[in-house]
Image: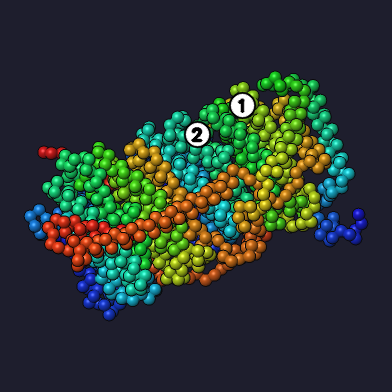
Amino acid sequence: MTDANILLLAIAIPALTPFVVAALGNRPNLRDGASVLASFATFAAVLALLDAVIDGARPAVTLLEVMPGLVLRFEVEPLGMLFATVASGLWIATAIYSIGYMRGANEKNQTRFYICFAIAIAAALGIAFSGNLFTLFIFYEVLTVSTYPLVAHKETPEARKGARVYLAILMTTSILFLLVAVIWTWNIAGTMDFRAGGILEGKIDPAYVPFLLALFAFGISKAALMPFHRWLPAAMVAPTPVSALLHAVAVVKAGVFTMLKVGTYIFGVGFLGKTGAAEWLMWLAAASILIASIVALTKDDLKARLAYSTVSQLSYITLGVALASQMGVIGGSMHIVMHAMGKITLFMCAGAIYVAAHKTKISELDGLGRKMPITFICFAIASLSIIGLPPFGGAWSKWYLMLAAADAGQIVIIGVLMLSSLLNVAYLLPIPARAFFAPPRGQVAHSLGAAAAPVREGVEEAPLLCLIPICVTAIGCLVLFFAVGGLYEYLLSIQILPESMP
Amino acid sequence: MTGSDIPPADDPARLPWLSRQLLWVDDKRNVDRLVWALALVCGALALADFLYHKHSYFPVENIPGFYGFYGFLMCAALVIAAKGLRVFLKRGEDYYAPLTVESEEHPDADLGRESVDA
Amino acid sequence: MPELLTPATLYFAAALILPFLPKGTLRQTLVLLVPIAGVGVFWTLPEGTFSPYNLMGLHIGLMRIDDLSRIFGLIFSIAAFLTAIYAWHVRDTIQQVAGLLYAGSAIGAVFAADLVTLFVFWEGTAIASVFLIWARRTEGAYATGMRYLIIQVGSGVILLAGIVLYYRETGTVSFTQMDLGSYATWAIFLAFGIKCAFPLLHNWLQDAYPAATVTGTVMLSAFTTKLAVYALARGFPGTEILIYIGAVMTLFPIFYAVIENDLRRVLAYSLNNQLGFMVVGVGIGTPLALNGTAAHAFCHILYKALLFMSVGAVLFRTGTAKGSELGGLYKTMPWTMVFCVIGAASISAFPLFSGFISKSLILSASANEGHFIVWLILLFASAGVFHHSGIKIPYFAFFAHDSGKRPKEAPRHMLLAMGLTAALCIGIGVYPAPLYALLPYDVVYEPYTTSHVVTQLQLLFFSALAFAVLMKTGVYPPELRSTNLDFDWSYRRVLPSVVGGVRHAVTGTWRFAARVALHRVDRMLVGIYRAHGPQGLLARTWPTGSMVLWIAVLLGMTLVLTYV
């Protein structure tokens, strides 16, 4: 099979899965099995493709030409390959987790859930492999629309309200800003292809670059850059697997991935650095990092806190683009991986807590660690990775972002990253710490000691199908710290400079 | 003291051997004697300065008994200054929060259990 | 197969295995054996750097062996061994695992040949140690642990930032001597300083040590701060500013120690004071001074552990370590008392005890270099430490007024741990030659000269006399249940109220702005309806271009609406 066929296969499998799932709709075991099987198959195809890409291949497929110049085209390059690997790999974990969660929480309409889920993955892969801005935009919108039913899944008034906000912000920004930016780019560059080193240099008046960048940055509101971040907390009404894969990995990472891709292949890192057009974006991202962290501190709802944490962490990646250097791109793309692994673990833990203990508020979690030790240990591990502490993966992406900031001579940005780590400690670690070590609330002061004695209570964890993916991704956080060498080598193959003319 | 007003736990016969050797410190007069003995030793040490050649780094060290007087004066000053500081620094144990390490008791689980499989 | 030759690997492997062993003797034995095996890893190796890697262009060296790292590695291993005996009764898996990870990280950091490895283990000590505080499982310990963790992680991220800048400046991450002068080295210096409890950065120490569990505090006292001393000795020897920082460090804690009630916090203050001596030694930077720092760190870990063990045993038996609640315990805990007195004599640097043969090095070094004021301060601090650690701790715990408490003697394993530590304290004091042989530089030094012995005895006995006189005359401040304000007041009281105020202002402004904005948008929509409604001006036929424009405006409006 040629690489191009594998590429099509990787998108086709999740795109066709909905039909299978729908056909098996009234036989839950087979249906869920099909969805897991599809996730494995997709991942296998993506891995095969990854192999080829590491060997230097850049497979490409042109599907159809809508209009002269408007081509639906896939082309694989290292950055997109990375995103595809992360999204499809973590789909396996989520597919397994979903079974445990959806059954444990007695959710309705599970068939619709699995259908939309598979479409969303297909769209994410489409974004990852898109060969030009047009294709990317199409799949970007497909992703938005296909996740709407997932957000509104519970069909309660709150769920509908959240989904409305979700759709409204994502749609309006993408049409209002992103589409305009795409057309503008097409207009002046005469092409929409992604090219190493960018397509805009020499074709646009440098004075306009910040504005075009602004249209892109706000248009790609899936990257949840403040002030267009509200859709993300609003989307937390969705069932937890959705929050885990889509709002920690696929959707939000599609946003920051697009940001990276536009920064590297449309503007060109060198061009951005030369014109200084991204400086405002750097400060906005820095502000976004800090403000979102501070807001996260004030949230008592576990998923809302994680959502704001995501807003803050996504801005790390935007910051990487805005720093406009190779280290920035490496740090940013590395953070896609590291954050995905950590945040999906955190969300899955939140779901496990909901399934096993029916708790959603952080203030209700005191002492729960003794009942759910594995969940909370994994939560702690993932938290440490998000904070950026060794020996967990998050430490490395922070290292490269700091290097990028040092290269750009931005001491203040280094300070922001440091402060952000501390804020992360303040809003993430109290959760496992209180779960394990805080005495149950409402105890009288003098009897504290006795009450806090480690009493053997029955361990009541979430279903095994929930627990296994959590453990796997938590261990993944640890493995990524040691396996970073290979990832770094791979990221070096992202072409920053334009190909030399023959 | 007579045997009758001593609680059983304080019966010298029931105390460890080492403790029994030290019971004399409970007597005020013995403590006074101890202080006088200490003063005597101090005097002797001060006088000892005349008996040997002091290897000194700074001239001030050559004052006989310098170390002794310096130690005494500075310690007295230390305690008085610290006592003065208390006026400004002392607060209640629950000053920072109702439940702090200072104000709450040490948890039982951490205490006295020599071989409990908790 | 990657080479992971460092003692830390052993500790981490043991920490991984431990939860799967049955609770009881097997686990304790494992914890006990690891430090011995750990010493075996590095003791026989020659000097040099082992386990080198080229990780993404960074030259990583997991294990560098030279005299300085070897002596710190040895004393950390001894400390880990002794605390393992002391904690023989502990059945709490979390404490056991955290203890192993903590000791392993500290030892790993000492052997780190490059700054990245140092950073990894540096954060390791921060994360692992906080569990020893949280393991107390009370509301107060939780809050203290959180503060401790944020400060420790803060030290780590400052170190990381410093390393990043240093790497960009010099192109290397190897951990060697640095000069203060750039952002990079200042950041690294500050990171070391936080962990070393420099003045104004010190409060985490006094906050955390009284909060940890009985056995946890003993562990905490051994590693974190001495790791920082090691890092300073490695990175900044001879940096003059350290002399003055160290001098201030020896000075101010003794005032607090006099009026502090919690005996474990008294010990934390005196620990801070002792660190000051080591920092002065690093600052002077002569071979004699650096030897003094290494030797003092070695002895200090032992006698400070001994003191924390004895006070810990009292806490273990009585449930309190407060001077105001204790007294007269010699009657039932005589052996604990004896060991406490040995620790007290060692920290006070009585001749024939370990403190004497190490502190003299630093005092002599400072005098050799002609730092008269610093020397006077150190002398004062020596007298002061005798006052509050040497006399106050044993006196208020075991003598003073009888509290009526008649607890049992400390358990056997605790006595054994204290006995071994006490034997080491005396052994080193009586026969210092083996310790001197381990020191990083070849310097001939004779502590037991007539001058030294007599002057030191004068200093100590007159200080004791001052204590006796002040006690007799009733001038000595009584032990009172209280909290004493220290610099942590700034972040435990001032900062929260400032943050609260700002938060109030921000939320108020935000709400007001949102209301105004909503009102405006409402009016705008009405206006638009007038223009676009059935009778509106814009309802007539218009060119397509302006249609697109108005659609865009409408969409924007919707967006604003949803957003607000």
Residue B11 rendering spot, x and y as whole percentages: 85, 58
Residue C368 rendering spot, x and y as whole percentages: 62, 23
**Mark sitting earlier along the chain (1/2):** 2
- Residue sticking out furthest to the left: A68
- Judge by depth and name the residue closer to the eye, A448 or A466: A448
Which of pointers 1 and 2 indicates the residue nearer the eye? 1
Q: Which color mode does the image show?
A: rainbow
Q: Which residue is mark 2?
A: C234
Identify the residue at image location x=31%, y=46%.
A281
Dividing the image into 4 quarters, which one contains the N terminus of chain B? bottom right
Question: Which label belongs to residue A265?
Answer: none
Q: Is residue C255 left or right of residue A293?
A: right
Pinpoint the chain carrying mark 1: C
Identify the residue at image location x=92%, y=57%.
B2
Pinpoint the chain carrying mark 2: C
- Judge by depth and name the residue closer to the eye, A448 or C24: A448
- Judge by depth and name the residue closer to the eye, B113 or A334: A334
Residue A202 rendering spot, x and y as whole percentages: 16, 39
Residue A266 rendering spot, x and y as whole percentages: 20, 47
Q: Are marks 1 and 2 on the same chain?
A: yes
- Quadrant in the rendering for residue C563: bottom left
Question: Which label belongs to residue C366?
Answer: 1
| Distance CA(mark 1)–CA(mark 2) | 19 Å
As drawn, C508 above or below C62 = below
Residue C377 in view (yes/no): yes
Considering the numbered disc 2 on the image, is that residue within a helix, a strand or a loop? helix
Identify the residue at image location x=57%, y=40%.
C200
Amino acid type at circle 2 is Arg
